[in-house]
Amino acid sequence: MGTPGKRSPTAHRTPEQIRRHNRTYGAKKSVMEKDKEGHRLRRQAIKDGRVRKGEDKDVHHVKPSVKGGADSKANTRIVSASKNRGHGMSPGGTRAGTGRRGGKRKR
């Protein structure tokens, strides 16, 4: 992944932080079930020809599944991994209203 202590450009974490995250949060049963569902959706997208194996693309829910969105083909689309895993909703992000770039200005 790079030199020790250097942050990943997509995960914004050091390799040690990623390993620690995978050992703790990533080992929870609920997280593993969610990952399993994501892999199923990706395999279906590959089968449908919407994405190819090895591409840096993710299956993105238009309406998030935690907000009642279905896992149907109509509710999913293929987007780049950096866009899907980005921090657009975090402070300073790029989505409208979340930071300085691209959002409404607070007066």
Image: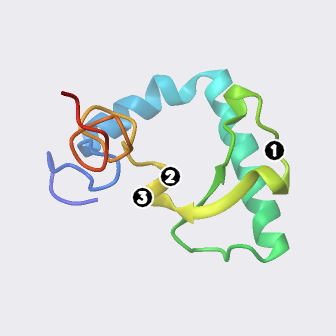
| Residue 71 - label | 1
Circle 1: element type = loop
Q: Position of residue 15 (x, y in %)?
A: 27, 45
Give left or right: position of 70 versus 17.
right
Counting from the top left corner in percent of width and height, residue 32 is at 65, 32
Q: Nearer the viewer, residue 20 or 38?
A: 38
9 on left or right of 82: left
Q: Residue at x 35, y 39 (%)?
A: 18
**What mark, if any, has residue 82 been given in the picture?**
3
Q: Quadrant of the N terminus?
A: bottom left
Secondary structure of the residue carrying numbered label 2: helix
Q: What distance separates the C-alpha of mark 1 from that of mark 2?
A: 16 Å
At label 2, the amino acid type is Asn
- Which residue is depicted at the point 72% across and 34% down? 65
Quadrant of the rendered structure where residue 13 is? top left
Type of amino acid under label 3: Ser
Q: Nearer the viewer, residue 64 or 43?
A: 64
Residue 84 is tagged as 2
Against 101, residue 57 (above or below) is below
Q: Is residue 37 above or below residue 24?
A: below
- Which image quadrant is residue 87 in? top left
